Amino acid sequence: MKTYIYPIVVKTLEDQEGYYAECPVIQGAHTIGDTPEVAIDNLKDAIKAIIAFKEADTVSYLPHFDENLKEMTFALPLTV
């Protein structure tokens, strides 16, 4: 297994209770949760599922970091 460091952003939902979490370097990796911890756990599952899908589809999916990315809240170590 390899460990990658993925930047993630966690925000409070403005129009409802809960939290939104996303990984801006992986298309489609975003989730919500009642707490920040739940949103992050859901995001871990989403990232793993996206990578597993890409690997099953024989597409290499290493992280791509956009140099123009304006916001990175913190990094998420994730073993896949």
Image: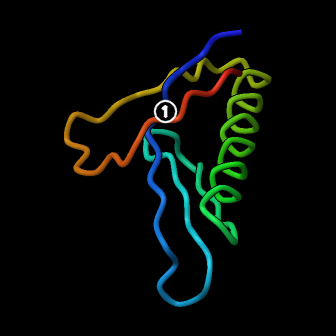
Say what amino acid the circle numbered 1 marks: Tyr
Q: Is residue 77 left or right of residue 69?
A: right
Q: Position of residue 29 (x, y in %)?
A: 59, 49
Q: Is residue 24 left or right of residue 49?
A: left
Q: Is residue 8 left or right of residue 39?
A: left
Residue depicted at x 49% and y 32%: 6
Residue depicted at x 50% and y 46%: 23
Vertical order, 10 against 76 (above or below): below
Residue linked to disc 1: 6
Vertical order, 42 against 49 (above or below): below
- Image quadrant containing the C terminus: top right
Vertical order, 77 against 69 (above or below): above
Secondary element at image label 1? strand
| Residue located farthest toward the top when viewing the structure as drawn | 1
* Closer-to-camera residue (33/47): 33
Residue depicted at x 26% and y 44%: 69
- Image quadrant containing the N terminus: top right
Q: Quadrant of residue 79?
A: top right
* Closer-to-camera residue (20/52): 20
Residue depicted at x 64% and y 11%: 2
Q: Residues within 10 Å of mark 1 (few under 14, many from 20)?
A: many
Vertical order, 6 against 72 (above or below): above
